[in-house]
Amino acid sequence: PTIQWFPGHMAKARREVSEKLKFVDIVFELIDARLPLSSRNPMLDQIVQQKSRLILLNKSDLADPNQTNLWVNYFREAGHHVLALTAKDDKSVKQIVPASKKVLAEKIARDQEKGIKPRAIRAMVLGIPNVGKSTLLNHLAGKKIASTGNRPGVTKGQQWLRFGTQLELLDTPGILWPKFEDPEVGQRLALTGAIKDDLLHLDDLALYELEVFTRFYPEQLKERYKLTDENLTLELPELLLLIAEKRGFKDDYERASEMLILELRQGRLGRYTLDRFEELSE
Ligand code: G4P
């Protein structure tokens, strides 16, 4: 689902998140492992402030594992607690409780000293649309949760979902907007399907996809479209036309673009990361 963000919506979303923060011990900030910078909300630090946080690099099953390792270290070195996650996978999701306990270790120890009886950790999930918030809630709760509340502005009674005896989650995740003011970020978000931006043309997205894959994942591209090393030296528009021809829709730029983007989103081109760790030092 696409959400149109207007200044009023942003203010409201922000207010709703701030309200909910009061009830929780910890925030699970979900970001897309393929876009560890682009898929973060630009105001999140300001909104979350001192509240304990666990950063979850979700969809790590789709991301380039080498890049994910680099990003995990990057966030750790910046002083964050972070996990690479696959919200669809129960085994992966099980790491969250022990990781949360680590984040809250001091508080838990303090409570214990004061003789306060241990209780479940209270958490909320926070992230931009499509990053996997509902998927995570469903897998934590071990059941399908109605997602009627999964939109900014739709309010309903707050409920806690229990995950074992150790974790309780607010049943409605906090939804915040991505950094779409930066065109390159917009392009990356659009390519993964995180946002539907009518201003971006499919052929631009497909050429961007080819740029990334010829540069960083040439073997994956060659294998998928039966290309040679020489093919990869073509100008990108020529390469797009060659792929179109191989797929039997010669000269149909539009259809070739659509196919390339769809196949990328379906994971047919293998794992990839668009926000490159190397870019940080550039
Ligand atoms: P949201 O609540 O944050 O808006 O996101 P949601 O959970 O609806 O997830 C958006 C899409 O991302 C869904 O795919 C979901 O299955 C997929 N997804 C979430 N987490 C992961 C993950 O760790 N790995 C992978 N590979 N995919 C993940 P969809 O195509 O929109 O729906 P569906 O066909 O999977 O149901």
Image (cartoon, rainbow, N blue to C red):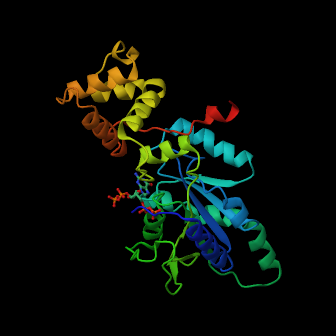
How many numbered dots are placed on residues in this image?
Answer: 0
Q: Is residue 261 above or below residue 130?
A: above
Q: Residue furthest top?
A: 230
Q: Is residue 141 above or below residue 235?
A: below
Residue 177 place in picture, x, y as percent = 56, 60
In the picture provided, is 98 more to the left or to the right than 256? right
**Residue at 65% from the left image edge and 55% from the top image edge:** 42
In the picture provided, is 265 more to the left or to the right than 63? left
Q: Is residue 162 above or below residue 91?
A: below
Quadrant of picture, ligand 1: bottom left
Query: Which one is in front, 200 or 113?
Result: 200
Residue 135 place in picture, x, y as percent = 43, 64
**Residue at 46% from the left image edge and 30% from the top image edge:** 212
Residue 188 place in picture, x, y as percent = 49, 43
| Res. 224 in view | yes
Query: Which one is in front, 124 or 93?
Result: 124
Residue 133 place in picture, x, y as percent = 48, 64
Placement of the C terminus among the 4 image quadrants: top right
**Residue at 50% from the left image edge and 61% from the top image edge:** 93
